Amino acid sequence: MAVHRILKMGDPRLARMAQPVSAFDTPELQRLVMDMVDTMAAANGAGLAAPQIGVDLQVVVFGTGAPNPRYPDAPPIPRTVLINPVITPLGAEQTDDWEGCLSVPGLRAIVPRWQRVRYQGMDIMGRPLDREVDGFHARVVQHECDHLQGILYPMRIRDFSRFGFNEVLFPGLAPEDD
Ligand code: NI
């Protein structure tokens, strides 16, 4: 088990365009994904992108298959490793909901996202992954894939009156520091 320190907003490694993965089913990729899953689990994250641990590759992990204590009202998302992702919005509908990020600890904001998306990419073995999802699942995928383009959710906020500290917005709900 290797839990990494999660980089915080302001670190230039979070602002890069991540590089595509070219070699699949390698020990290096296996180790990276295991470390990302361990790091996400230790932080109760809904997802984690490789740049958040300083790795400049297009790899995201998300979902635990079980309810998440940081988002107790959200439906569970299957545990997924997504590499070299492409997201396509399905329809024009956007929805607003609360969002946080392990790289922006302690804060939440209302962020607009596509309600329904298709995402395509590879799994760790290089097998294609192709899903159509909506709601919280779609939100999490969009958030994580934004990390691969150097975008953190505060850059998506439209209404800054609904950006604040978790402990103030959701008193009694917030575990630990986020
Ligand atoms: Ni994030």
Image: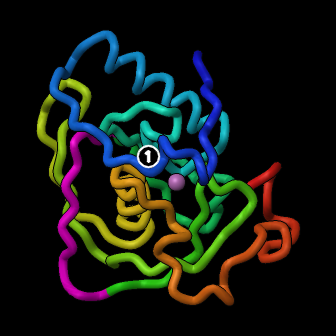
Foreground of the two, 16 or 146: 16
Foreground of the two, 58 or 118: 58
In the rendered image, which residue does mark 1 sit on?
Answer: 62
The answer to whether residue 166 is above or below residue 21 is below
Q: Residue at x 40, y 27 (%)?
A: 33
Q: Residues within 10 Å of mark 1 (few under 14, many from 20)?
A: many
The answer to whether residue 93 shows anywhere in this view is yes
User: How would you classify the magenta stretch by its main secondary structure?
Assistant: strand
Foreground of the two, 95 or 143: 143
- Disc tally is 1
- Which region of the structure is painted magenta? 81-93
Q: Is 85 inside the magenta-drawn segment?
A: yes
Q: Is residue 178 left or right of residue 31?
A: right
Which quarter of the rendered picture does the N terminus lie within? top right
x and y percent of residue 84 in the render?
22, 42
Q: Farthest residue to the left: give it.
A: 128
Please name the amino acid that badge 1 sits on. Phe
Q: Residue at x 84, y 74 (%)?
A: 168
The answer to whether residue 39 is above or below residue 1 is below
The answer to whether residue 72 is above or below residue 60 is below
Q: Residue at x 61, y 63 (%)?
A: 100
Q: Is residue 44 left or right of residue 176?
A: left
Foreground of the two, 49 or 120: 49
Q: Residue at x 61, y 68 (%)?
A: 73
Name which quarter of the figure residue 174 lies in: bottom right
x and y percent of residue 153 in the render?
51, 66
Q: Is 48 inside the magenta-drawn segment?
A: no
x and y percent of residue 151 in the render?
43, 60
The answer to whether residue 102 shows anywhere in this view is no
Which quarter of the rendered picture does the C terminus lie within? bottom right
Dot 1: element: strand
